[in-house]
Image: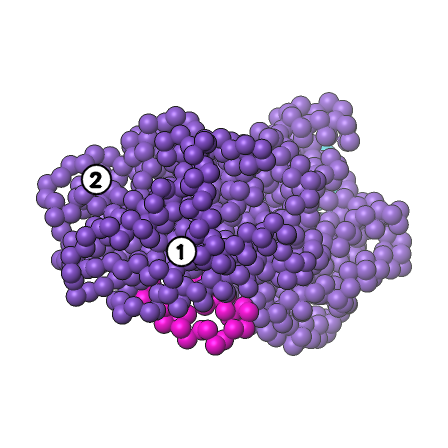
Chain colours: A cyan, B purple
Amino acid sequence: MDAVFETFKLRAEAVSAEVHRFPHKSAALDFILYYLHDVGISHTPQAGAVWAPCPFLDGFDQKQLSSQLPGLSFDVNREVSAEAKVGISQLDWAIANTGTLVQDAARVDQRLVSTLPLIHIALIRSDRLVPDLPSALSKIRPEQTNYISFITGPSRTADIERVLTIGVHGPEKLIIVFFDGVVCDEPGRVN
Amino acid sequence: METKFRESIDKAVHNPNLTGALGRFSEAYRISRQKAYEGYDFEALRTQIAERKSYAASHLDELADLFTRNVEARGTKVFRTNDPARVREYILNVARENSVKSVVKSKSMASEEIHLNKHLEAAGIEVGETDLGEWIIQLAGQTPSHMVMPAIHMTKEEVATVFNEQVEEGQKPDIPKLVKFARGKLRTKFINADMGITGANIAVAETGTLVIVTNEGNARLVTTLPKIHVAIVGLEKLMEKFDDVVPVLTALPKSATAQLMTSYVSMISGPVPNTDGTPKQLHVILMDNRRTEMSQDPKFKQAMQCIRCASCLNVCPVFRLVGGHVFGKIYTGGIGTILTAWFDALKASDDIQSLCIQCGNCTEVCPGKIDIPGLILELRRRLAVEKGQPLAQKAIFSVVNNRKLFHSMLRAAYVMQKPLQKGNFIRHLPFFFSEMTEFRSLPAIAEAPLRDTIKKIEQPACKEKIALYAGCLIDFAYPEMGESLVKILNKAGIEVVFPEGQTCCGAPARYSGAYEVAAQNANDNINALLADGVTYVVSACPTCTVALKHDFISTFESLGQTDSLPRARQLAEKVIDFSTLVKKLVDEGRLKFKEGQHLGKITYHDSCHLKRTLHATQPPRQLLTQAGYEIADMYEADMCCGMGGTYSLKLPEISAPILERKLVNIRNSGAPVVVMDCPGCVMQIRGGLDKQRSTIRAEHTAQRLADELE
């Protein structure tokens, strides 16, 4: 597991993603709250944060979190996402040898928070890490999910003079947060 | 060749922004691509892609039906047509029915193939390309210069100017700022668009899934924000199983941009809810536009294996000089020439097919395992059949086909060249021939051809006999190369016989599409070379070797002359190239190098046919090292020298800069001698060195080895 994680970290960082890992959910939450505070999340335009519904949030009081951090919203829509600086969502699988995250993104809120804001924080359960593309594809069922997203690093282009530039249409920053300490509840199912 | 085409070449090769950007890219690409494939078995991977795509091409109808059933079951509308006009009409209808005022597009070659933007705009609909490169090109009113990097020919200053003139004043030539500006401007377009149009990289039949790959993330927005999504999918994108995604998605990012994975991959299997909760309208257009016909053509079916990575462009010595604009069409480069011939018209490929120098670089990197140069030759052949050969070419080949006349004319030419000759070179030709000697000197025709001088060599009586196939260049310009070969084989106890009936190998005719002429050359040579009881037929010219070993068979096959095949195969078995034969003799202990020699530095140039068809890169290097030379490898040693047979005569404006690059690499190796196995390459490189008054010598491996054996 640790070797696979190290491979993921290496590959994801090679494509300019940030990778963190925490022993349990509350440590991951602390990190996110600290980070949001640090980048100045507030109610002002272009300074909000928007968090899409996800299993990670089970057991946390969203109201309390919002009041603790003004500018953090759990109510995802087009306008809020377009105005947000940070979008947060949970992804379903991670592929080690390419540093890729995979998500059932049929719900539009999952895509809004990961396309429109400048920064995307991607939560992922550590036990959802697989070694390669074939093992990831064997876990997903396209006939049951109308939209599956693969995300590898932030949005990029090299269209002007072949100079690599991060952050074109999607996020310019991708922060990947692994969290351990949960048992695999429904094996084989995409969240 | 059309004047307009010649002018476009001239413009391209004299555009330093274009050639500089493409040149630097091709150099960087070679290294980064290799790095991306580290740890992968590329041959196994591409074999898998070729098999899966080929299977799909043989079952297009079936897979299109299955795909349609699966996506329709989930509420997607599917429209399938062979006619580009009906594709446009369908999209316009959807737009009208839904009062669409603005469209955002992510990159779709299929939409460009049918000139969709023009038609949508004519109907009063605003169309925004959202791929940054495509948007820049759209604003500038230009066409893409590269399939994957459409604006690679533009500098940041030019991009800033386009933004200032077309979008908003005040933009500075600062790349991150220009990108940020584009993000802001296009974001508004995304938010306001009523319809999103995409292509697809794969369409999986068994699950009814579209796979769309981007780096910028524009396809995610195009498929998320507007309420209507139209995907235009060429039939060649169909694949049978969801598992087939693995090899394509493994190879595509590595081959296209040397990435392990593109930033975003979207797999769409049906309509998803819009941001207001309504279900998205999803339309998939399965576009044929002669793809079915192509898949039924025994030769061109393999072009359906293309995954549109453009790696054939990136490694092409010609493309990196001229870029995409010369092609004048949507699809550019090697594969683009083939796709243009089918999706546009065979005639449309007439000029651009001549750009292929047949070096074979693309065949080494193509993840679909497509024989691109072979298919371009086939286009050439079909074009020659359709419109007939040019008169001058016909006249030349009728001479080449008459062995005695051809040989006596070459002898006569020796006398006629006298006033132009300086030493062993012709440095200037008068009148319209002058272009041929502008960038390199030509070799003078030898006083006596090899067919005469070989008779004067006293060969020991040996039990084993090997036939020498000289080829025109060695026979008439460089007999000393053949003499060296005789000397070497004699030392191994082999007598070299020269079958008199041998004539031109037919390569010039074949590479010009004149297959009937090539077939007659083949028959003459087969008759001459199979006559003697020899163990091998050896040639010191890789192009001739390839002709004897492979092309005779393929020419007969193309013409349906199956009667000639058994004897062509019999000959092919016996044919061997010089270095491979000599290496074998050394390994068997029949030849021995003088001991303890230190002969100094040389550099070795890999000839295209020797490396990529005969796969003999090591034998000449090993022989030269065993002889006592120290090989100083040059940069891009296996890059074409620009000769390409008659190519250097037909397109000297391209041949010259390719040679120039080669000469720089030779110089930078620091070696005083460059060695190669092909007399054609010697002609080009030696001629170029002579023009530059360089002291570096260019020689055939045979000449370098002849005196170093016991």
Q: Categorize mark 1 by other alpha carbons within 10 Å: few (<14), some (14-19), many (20+).
A: many
**Residue A163 against residue B62 in the figure, above or below:** above
The residue to which callout 1 is attached is B544
Question: Across the whole image, how many numbered discs are drawn on residues?
Answer: 2
Q: Nearer the viewer, residue B453 or A79?
A: B453
Is residue B98 positioned above or below A82 on the image?
Answer: below
Query: Depth check: B269 or B359 in front?
Result: B359
Rounded to the nearest angstrom, the CA distance separating label 1 from label 2 is: 27 Å
In which image quadrant can residue B404 be found? bottom left
Q: Is residue B267 visible?
A: no
Front residue of this view, candidates A133 and A27: A133
Q: Residue at x 22, y 38 (%)?
A: B630
Figure quadrant of the C terminus of chain A: bottom right
User: Of callouts 1 and 2, which one flags the residue occurring earlier in the amino acid sequence?
Assistant: 1
Q: Nearer the viewer, residue A58 or B301?
A: B301
Element on which disc 2 rests = strand
Kind of residue at badge 1 = Cys
Place of residue A95 in the rendered image (x, y in percent of width and height, measured from the top left) = 47, 56
Please name the predominant secondary structure of the magenta segment in the image: helix
Residue at left offset 85%, top offset 57%: B92
Which residue is under mark 2?
Answer: B629
Asked whether disc 1 touches disc 2, contact meaning CB atoms under 8 Å apart, the reply is no
Q: Secondary structure at mark 1?
A: helix
Point out residue B482 in the picture as x, y percentages from the top left corner. 30, 49
- Residue B553 located within the stretch drawn in magenta: yes
The answer to whether marks 1 and 2 sit on the same chain is: yes
Q: Which residues are magenta?
A: B550-575
**Residue drawn at x 42%, y 46% as measured from the top left:** B411
Q: Say whether residue B649 is visible.
A: yes
Question: Taking A99 as reference, is B178 left or right?
Answer: right
Q: Give the amino acid at mark 2.
A: Tyr
x and y percentages locating residue B137 in the rendered image: 70, 39
